[in-house]
Amino acid sequence: MKVARAILFGLDRRVIVGAVRVVITDAAPKIILLGADAFLPMPVPPGWDAKAVFAYGQELPFRADEGRLEVVP
C-alpha cells in the first residue's frame, strides 16, 4: 500500500478543481467521486512527474438503463 496525490481537473481538462490523497493497494483507482462529481483517469499533463501524481478529469455522470442513457445536467 502507498499513498499518492491525485490532481482533479475540470471538464475542460485545463483548470485544477482540487487535489486528494488516494491509498493505492494494487493500482490507481478507476474512478474518484468527490461530492456529486465523478473523475476518471486522464494522461498526466506534459512536464509533470507521472510517478509523483495521478491526474483525473471530471466527467458528466450518467445512468444507463435498458434502452435508455440519461445524462445528469
Image (spheres, helix red, strand yellow):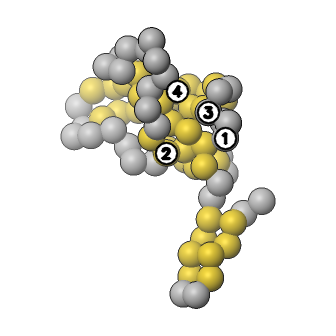
Q: Residue at x 54, y 44 (%)?
A: 39
Whichever of callouts 4 and 2 sits on the residue coming sooner in the sequence is 4
CA gap between label 1 and label 4 equals 13 Å
Q: Can you tell which mark lies on residue 66?
A: none
The amino acid on which the numbered mark 3 sits, given as a three-letter code, is Arg
Badge nearest the viewer, 1 or 4: 1
Q: Earlier in the sequence, mark 2 or mark 1?
A: 1
x 44%, y 26%: residue? 44
Cα–Cα span, label 4 and label 3: 11 Å
Which residue matches tag 1?
11
Quarter location, residue 73: bottom right
User: Disc number at residue 7?
Assistant: 4
| Residue 23 on image: x %, y % | 35, 33
Contact, CB < 8 Å: mark 4 with mark 2? no
Please say if the residues under marks 3 and 1 sit with CB atoms less than 8 Å apart. Answer: yes
Q: Quadrant of the N terminus?
A: top left
Disc 4/disc 2 C-alpha distance (Å) = 11 Å
Residue 13 is tagged as 3
Residue 30, image x, y percentages: 39, 48
Residue type (three-letter) at the residue carrying disc 2: Leu
Q: How many marks?
A: 4
Are the residues at dot 1 and dot 4 in contact (C-beta closer than 8 Å)?
no
In terms of secondary structure, where does tag 3 sit?
Answer: loop
Residue 3, position in %: x, y? 34, 25
The disc at residue 40 is: 2
